[in-house]
Amino acid sequence: MKIADKSTSAEKLVRDALEKAKKYAEYNIFTFLNEEGALKKAREIDARIKKGEKVGKLAGVPYALKDNFLSPEGETTASAHILEGFVSPITATAVAKLEAEGAIMIGRTNLDAFAHGSSTENSYFGPTLNSRDKKRVAGGSSGGSAVAVALDIVEFATGTDTGGSIRQPASFNGVYGLKPTYGCISRYGVVAMASSTDCIGFFTKTPDDMDLLMSIASGQDPKDMTTLPDYYNTDADTELSDLRPSWATGADRAPEPRNDGREGACRGSLNSSVRIGIIKDFDNESVDSDIREALKKKVELLKSKGHEIVELEMPALKYGLAAYYIIVPAEVASNLSRYDGVRYGFRSEKSDDLDALYYNTRFEGFMPENKRRIMIGNFVLSSGFYDAYFLKAAKARTMIINEYEKAFSECDFILTPVSPNPAFKLGEKVNDPVAMYLEDVMSVSLNLAGVPGLTIPAGETKDGLAVGLQLVGPRRSDKALIEFSKELA
Amino acid sequence: MKYLPTIGIECHVQLCTKTKLFSEVDNDAKDKEPNSCVSPVCYALPGMLPRLNGEAIKMAILAGRAMNCEINAHSRFDRKHYFYPDSPKGYQITQFYEPIIGEGFVELPSGTKVRIEHAHLEGDAGKLTHFDTYSLVDLNRVDTPLIEIVSMPDIHSAKDAHDYCKELWRLMCYAGVTNGDLYNGNMRFDVNISIAAEGAKELGTRAEVKNLNSFRSVERAVEYEIKRQSKLLDAGKKVVQETRGWNDAKGETTGQRSKEEAKDYRYMPEPDLPPINLSAEFIDEESAKLPLMPKDYREAFGGVIAEDILEILLDYPSLMQKLKEIDNKYVKSVSNLFASVLLAEEKSAEYLNDLPSAADLNELSSMNEKKELSSTATKEVFLRLFDPQMKGRGAKNIAKELGLIQENDLGALEKIVDTVLAKPETAKAQEDFKAGQEKVLGFLVGQVMKESHGKANPSVVQDILRKKLS
């Protein structure tokens, strides 16, 4: 990516980005443009460069921030009516780390409200359009961020991935999108969707940019007890016991999301020959033929480079979608409980008593998809239903974790489609929630297992729509995953 | 008909950690402005995550050990959901499925054993103050660490209910995990009461009286419930399973919420906090820090201090700790001073936090033993030991300064007695005494005391007078 230096000023980089952002206004990418703030920061960086002072690794690099990251610049709304007017006094850890290296946020990007969705159509601010075809969806929930990078407005954009929200829009717009290992990047200051599957990640144009951002943003954060000790920037296995909380000097370990998968042979340097798993269960007619063709081509490419292809059977993955749409709504319903109109954000005017305040604020403030997930979540957690739904889904989750562990004993990485179809038409699935959920069938199991997945651009369909594939690795293989993706370019 | 009451008690104890259970903000909100001890985690800003306070884990271990409980090596947190302005997150973080403290028991002074089912850690809720047309919300109390102690239904009388709560309070204070200020809600009790015909195999339907904040109100509420439920059953009616409130002024309980209206809390594992895994070494290390408990003091002082006095003094851990430092032979006299002088003082609460040194108390007792101080003078010097102006100077110096040291020197006393006997105004009394009038001896002793400016030891003076006038 282009970094500000003596020949190119940060101000120019930022001005160019803002100009492009305005040029593409019809795509409805941004919920807020940070013109004043971004230019002020750019000038500060330029002054420091002029004085010969040290500037960060992302000096003057314009980026787009998904609107569910807290920062005092602009309102943090998560594209939800109920957070309208909310200016955060807090800066998310991930944002603070990027900005400490000199990155400059030029705008906040559109998403499905509270990241509930696969098309950005559930946004209070309306849908974001696909970068290749304005009649089609951008994908979601991080649709705005994907399109901002695809249209080359910014060098990179942040995203959150709870069930595919980075990988699918990256695939729909032909850019790189990484959902790291669960616990790799702090969730502190990011509007929570589902705590046990939420991951912070990025959209970039190259694997090297992704690597740079990961090296900056990853690492343990005392403000997020589910973060892992920094493994991304250390070659050796970080000794977990060295990072135990001080109050538990014995057996306590740094949080391990569910089972710890096999470390994989793929950490650090890669062998010349890598074993790539292909999931047989995903190779059927419900998957778009252009996508299957793209996968076939990449498989041939890998073979030609001397890599080994392994066919995998992963039958437990078929429970992924069902388990996901129980566990995630349960956590969603719980995490959205705090939006009650009492302390911040939107409050319904016509509320005479406490119950009416809650009812009206939440009725008016949430989008239909938010309400759908709150209802599902509260249902599966209801007394008498917990064992039948939530507990059963948790068991399915363990099966999926075990399935991935087994798979990574047979191969180093897995290559699969990201979604069964390329970008669909605006409005096509908006009234059919189940069809919309089915779009997540190939992406959600990674979130349940906590393993990393990287979307790589893999050509286009006959109609010119972007096709992406998903490279999956064992937990904590993020760096190797990014490195290996260069083999597929 | 005769009924047997069965009672189980849930007790919430606020832990006196420096910071709150889930964020690094002041946990001591006493006398502070409303909403001044809150962090973004407490008031539930979007994207905020709980961070577990290790000090609360250590205190939970001590609290558990004080109740002879197992400490679970593995425990975790759950969310308990409900909407109310005292709960900004919309849920309370508690331990529903796997609590940190397992089974144990509490032994009452009467010898009754009450088993503990479990105890768990959780965050407290905020406080609402209701007015005619509005309510005020104070979030200072949000996420103050609590342990909730759940007893087995092993209590069968109002007296035992009272004693159990009081013993729990003592245990928690001795363990040093709470400030133990009941008036300010540091401990609150929910009492489950049912009655059944004596000899019946099954327990009756229970009512729960919530939010009692004194031992006396626990006792009264249980007495009231036993009467209320007995009347119902005698009249052939049924007890309804419900939550009841206690009206202290009226001395009665009133129905609040029946079982049918009970909330569904939709418990769910807390995904933002990793499980707590404690090694055996860590648990042992922390358990070893448990100070002496009431039962240890009962064992140590049982034969020395009268039982009724010991039970009074046991309410004050600092006094028991002090007695432990006192020379064995003075324990009894110092304990009497504590019970009859110190605790009778208006400022005793203040004094309890800053007791005189064991050396001072030993010296004082020794002077009293040697009759250098009369019992009245001993009490006076004892109180002066707490006086900010005097303390630190030592019992002997204070006694000297106040001129309270008794004259025990026989030679010197004999001289004074001679002087008095030589006075003409005592002549008649001397004759009367010799003639067998015992009561005039008091007059003569008084004259000697006057002559000695009060320093003479009256019993020694009496002996000398008897000898001289015989």
Image: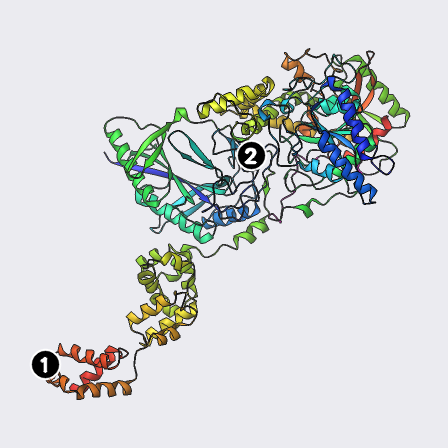
Q: Earlier in the sequence, mark 1 or mark 2?
A: 2
Foreground residue among A458 and B33: B33
Whether residue B82 is visible: yes
Q: Which residues are magenta?
A: A247-267
Residue B300 location in percent, x, y?
40, 61
Q: Tell me the kind of residue under disc 2.
A: Ala
Dots 1 and 2 on the same chain: yes
Q: How many marks?
A: 2
In the rendered view, would you say B168 is above or below A461? below
Three-letter residue code for mark 1: Gly
Taking the image as shown, residue A332 lies to the left or right of residue A67, namely left
Residue at point 35%, 38% (across, down): B7
Q: How is the image coloured?
A: rainbow
Q: Is residue B250 left or right of residue A298?
A: left
- Badge 2 crowding class, 10 Å Cα cut-off, few under 14, some 14 to 19, many 20 or more, is many
Q: Residue B44, labelled with which disc?
A: 2
Above-or-below relation of A419 to B317? above
- Residue A362 location (% of width, % of height): 53, 22
Q: Could you tell whether A281 is left or right of A485 in the image?
A: left
Report whether A379 appears left or right of B168.
right
Quarter that holds the C terminus of chain A: top right
> Which numbered dot is residue B336?
none
| Chain letter behind tag 2 | B
